[in-house]
Amino acid sequence: MSWYEELAKPTWAPPAPVFGIVWSILYPIIIVAYGYVIYRIARGEFPTALLVPILLNVVSNIAFTPIQFGLRNLWLAELDIVVVLVTIVWSMIAIWPHTRWTSLALTPYLVWVMIATALQSSITWLNR
């Protein structure tokens, strides 16, 4: 974490503890929303194609921390967070016709990742 603390960041960057608080709220929402869709897919009620954006989202979300803090690769982390953002939008659009409440439940996740993407882009640019 000391590496991250030493990076140049925009003035509007949230303090480090905010990330833990926000993710501790978002992860249960993500688990319930995606879990519900996966459950309905398993029962044959939703098309299996919905798994594509969901799984891509989960994998890219999980990959961000090792890329950013393990590899310390800002450009790859930038690419990864864009994939996270795009797959949230994709999954929300794909899920919408089948269960609107689940799609809408992902809105806080979308908003946070939009902010995180802007932050990552700023950090990547400031530390090029």
Image (cartoon, rainbow, N blue to C red):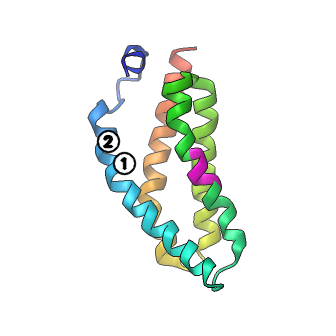
Q: Which residue is drawn at the image coordinates 31% and 31% (left, top)? A: 16
- Measured as percent of width and height from the top left, residue 38 is found at 57, 72
Q: Which residues are magenta?
A: 56-60
Q: Which residue is drawn at the image coordinates 47% and 63% (left, top)? A: 106
Number of other residues with Cα within 10 Å of mark 2, as a class: few under 14, some 14 to 19, many 20 or more: few
Quarter holding the N terminus is top left
Front in this rendered view, residue 110 or 30: 30
Tell me the element at label 1: helix
The quarter holding residue 37 reads bottom right
Tell me the element at label 2: helix
Q: Amino acid at mark 1?
A: Trp
Q: Which residue is mark 1?
A: 23
Q: Which residue is drawn at the image coordinates 46% and 76% (left, top)? A: 101
Q: Which residue is mark 2?
A: 20
Number of other residues with Cα within 10 Å of mark 1, as a class: few under 14, some 14 to 19, many 20 or more: some
Q: Is residue 116 above or below residue 97?
A: above
- Measured as percent of width and height from the top left, residue 40 is found at 57, 80
The quarter holding residue 31 reads bottom left
Q: Is residue 67 above or below residue 21?
A: above
Q: Amino acid at mark 2?
A: Gly
Front in this rendered view, residue 46 or 93: 46
User: In this view, which residue lies farthest toward the right?
Assistant: 49
Q: Which residue is drawn at the image coordinates 65% and 59% (left, top)? A: 53
- Measured as percent of width and height from the top left, residue 98 is found at 60, 81
Q: Is residue 44 magenta?
A: no
Q: Describe residue 125's horizontal placement relative to residue 44 as left or right.
A: left
- Measured as percent of width and height from the top left, residue 89 is found at 59, 58
Q: Describe residue 72's horizontal placement relative to residue 94 as left or right.
A: left
